[in-house]
Image (cartoon, grey):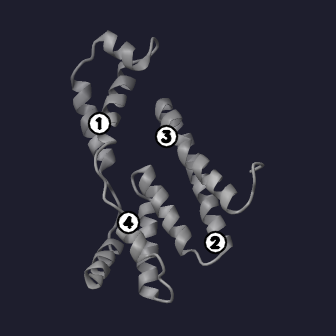
Amino acid sequence: DDKAARAALARAAAATEFSTYYGVLLHAVLETTRALPMSAPLVHELTGADGNAYAATYMIAAGNVMYLPTPSLAPVFEACKAPGKNAMLRAQCARIAHLLAWGDTVIARAAGLALQERLADSADARARILSGAIVAGLIGTLVQGLIDTSTLVLFGLWLPTMALALASARYGLGESA
């Protein structure tokens, strides 16, 4: 019902962070997987001739954790579809968008940026949000690349590339962007 949805939205907006606990779970699985030594043939099969056991361990851990369920954000997007002049609803939606944009997964971050864009009050504000997404994605890619090259290749380039493609399509920037 509407009253329960508003109460849930208020609780979400009052949170200090959005976390799916992906990082915590990944660390736990990674530590557990590292405790069990892998045979050289298995490492070779997973990572190629020049691979190492750490990369193989990370692939196993990430592969297991990435399929864990995450909460649906559809109710938030529905509630924040058109806040209109309701200042409290707009503030709650903006707070949730901020929490998501600083969340612990690429999906949460993308959802937060999408919600921020939805709440933006002008085309310029929407363009700034997408520009920020591109810059944040590129910085994240750089930092992640310093830590782990395989993650950089698999996941790091996805967010800035998608943000640039969306901005290009939405604002008519064409292929030159």
Mark number for residue 97? none
Q: Which residue is mark 3?
A: 155
Task: Name the mark nearer the viewer: 3 or 4.
Answer: 4
Badge nearest the viewer, 2 or 1:
1
Density class for disc 1 (Cα within 10 Å; few <14, some 14-19, many ≥20) is some
User: Where is 151 relative to 15, above or below?
Assistant: above
Q: Earlier in the sequence, mark 1 or mark 4?
A: 1
Q: Which residue is mark 4?
A: 74
Classify mark 3: residues with Cα within 10 Å, few (<14), some (14-19) or many (20+).
few
Mark number, residue 125: 2
Number of other residues with Cα within 10 Å of mark 2, as a class: few under 14, some 14 to 19, many 20 or more: some
Q: Position of residue 124 (x, y in %)?
A: 68, 71
Mark 3 or mark 1, which has the lower sequence index? 1
**Upstream in the sequence, badge 3 or badge 4?**
4
Kind of residue sitting beneath label 2: Ala
- Observer-nearest residue: 137 or 147? 137
User: Mark 1 falls on what kind of element?
Assistant: helix
Of mark 3 and mark 2, the one earlier in the sequence is 2
Instruction: Calculate the distance from the C-alpha at mark 3 to the C-alpha at mark 2.
Output: 27 Å
Between tags 1 and 4, which lies in front? 4
Q: For the residue marked with disc 4, what is the amino acid? A: Ala
Residue at image point 62% right, 56% down: 166
Residue 99, horizontal then vertical, whole percent: 41, 65
Give the CA distance from mark 2 to mark 1: 38 Å
